[in-house]
Amino acid sequence: MNRLPAISSDDWLVKVPQITLAFWIVKILCTTVGETGADYLAVDAGLGQGFTGALMGALLLLALVVQLRSSRYTPWKYWLTVVLVSVVGTQITDLMTDGLGISLYASTPAFAVLLALIFAVWWRVERTLSIHDIKTRRRELFYWAAILCTFAMGTAAGDLATEALHLGFTRGAIAFGGLIALTWLAFRLGGHAVLTFWIAYILTRPFGAALGDLLTQAKTYGGLGMGVMWTSALFLTVIVLLVGMEQYTLSNERRLAAGTH
Amino acid sequence: MPSLNFRCFPATALAALTLAAALVGCSKPADAPVAAAPSGAPAARVASALGNLSVFRAIAADVSALVDKNDLAGAKTRIKDLELAWDSAEAGLKPRAADDWHVVDKAIDRALKAVRADAPTQTDCKAALDDLLKTFDRMQGKA
C-alpha cells in the first residue's frame, strides 16, 4: 500500500514540491487561472491570440530560466512556472485545433505518444522517472517537458470529451473527478506511484477547466454564474494563500535549520 | 526534521473551506433544471440543440444595421460585444451541439475578420453579416 512519501534530509536538493493535497488544489486552480488569464488578454483586452501566445511563451521562458537557475525549491518560482506552462500548453492545443485545423482525434493520441517518448528518453538517460528525485538540471528539464506535454494533452482530451461525448462542464467535472478518485485509489492500493502521478496530472487539466466553467458559466447554461472575475479572484486568493503559506513555512524552516548548523 | 511539503493544514483547510463556501453559496440556483431553452420559433424546421441564440443574434443585427448605415467604426465597436458574449458562453453552448457551434463560430470569425479588416468595405461586411444572421436563423429553425 502506498503512503505519502517520507521526507529525508536529501530533499534539500529537490527542486520541486512534495505531492500533497495542497499541491493538487493549487495545480487544479492554476489550470483555470492560466486559461482564464490568457483568454482575458486575447479577447477582452483585445491583444489577439497571436500576440498573447508570443507574450506567454516569452514569459514562460523567463520563468523557466528563473526556476532552473534557482538552487533549490522556491514555491513562488515553481508555481509561477506551472501557471505559465498551463497557459502555453493550452495555447499549443488551441493553435493546433483552431489555427491549423488538426482534429482532436489525431492530436490527443499524438500528445500521448509524445508524452510516452519523453518518458522513454527520460528513463533511458536517467534510469528513473521519480518525481522525488528532481535534483539535476537535466532531470528538471525532463520534468518540465513532461508537464508541458500533459497540459497540452489534457486540453486536447478535455476538448475531445466535449466534442465527441457532448460532455458539458457539470458532467465533465463529475467524470474527470471520478477518474482522479480512481487514480488516487489505485495509488493507495499499491499502484505505481510515478505512473499514477502523471495520470492524475493529465486528468486534473480537464477537471480544472470543467470546475472553472462550472463556476463562471451563466446559470442559463447550468453554471453557478459567478462570472470570470469573481472566480479568478477566488482561485487566485486560494493559490496565493497556499503558496504564500508554503513559502513562509519553508523560509522559516530553512532559517531555523541554518541556525542550528 | 524539516520537510518541504505543504504541511500547513490550517491553510489547506481554509482554502478548501473558501472553495466549499463559494460552491454552496452559489449552488442553489444551479439545482433548478435548466433545459435547453426553446427557441420560440414555430418548429417548421428542426432547431439546433444549441438552444436560444437570440442574445447573440440581436448583437449581430445591431452590427448589421450599423454596416447598412456605413458606420463601419461603430460596427467594429459593437461586434466586440458579440465576440465577448460568444466567447464567454462557449463552455455552456458547445457541448450541446459541437458541430453546430463550430458552424456559428466560423461565421462569427468571418464577420469579425471583415469588420476588423485594415480597410473594411461595406460590401464585405454586409456579406459576412448577412451570412451570420442567416446562420443564426438556420440554427433556430427559421430558415
Image (spheres, grey):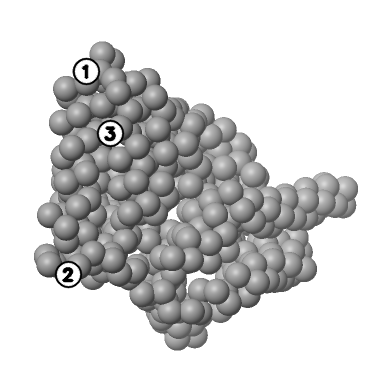
Mark with earlier residue (1, 3): 3
Pointer 1 and pointer 3 on the same chain? yes
- The answer to whether residue A22 is above or below residue B75 is below
- Residue in the picture at 65% in, 72% down: B25
Mark 1: few, some, or many residues within 10 Å (few <14, many ≥20)?
some
Side of A35 where B132 appears, left or right: left
As helix, strand or loop, the secondary structure at mark 3 comes to helix
- Residue in the picture at 43% in, 79% down: B33
The numbered mark 1 sits on a residue in which chain? Answer: B
- The answer to whether residue A137 is above or below residue B118 is below
As helix, strand or loop, the secondary structure at mark 2 comes to loop
| Quadrant of the drawing holding the N terminus of chain B | bottom right
| Quadrant of res B110 | top left
Q: CA distance from mark 2 to mark 3?
A: 26 Å
Mark 2: few, some, or many residues within 10 Å (few <14, many ≥20)?
few
- Residue in the picture at 17% in, 46% down: B134
Mark with earlier residue (2, 3): 2
Residue that badge 3 annotates: B64
Q: Amino acid at mark 2?
A: Ala
Side of A59 where B18 appears, left or right: right
Mark 2 touches mark 3? (CB < 8 Å): no
Q: CA distance from mark 1 to mark 2?
A: 37 Å
Please provide percent x and percent y for residue B92: 37, 61
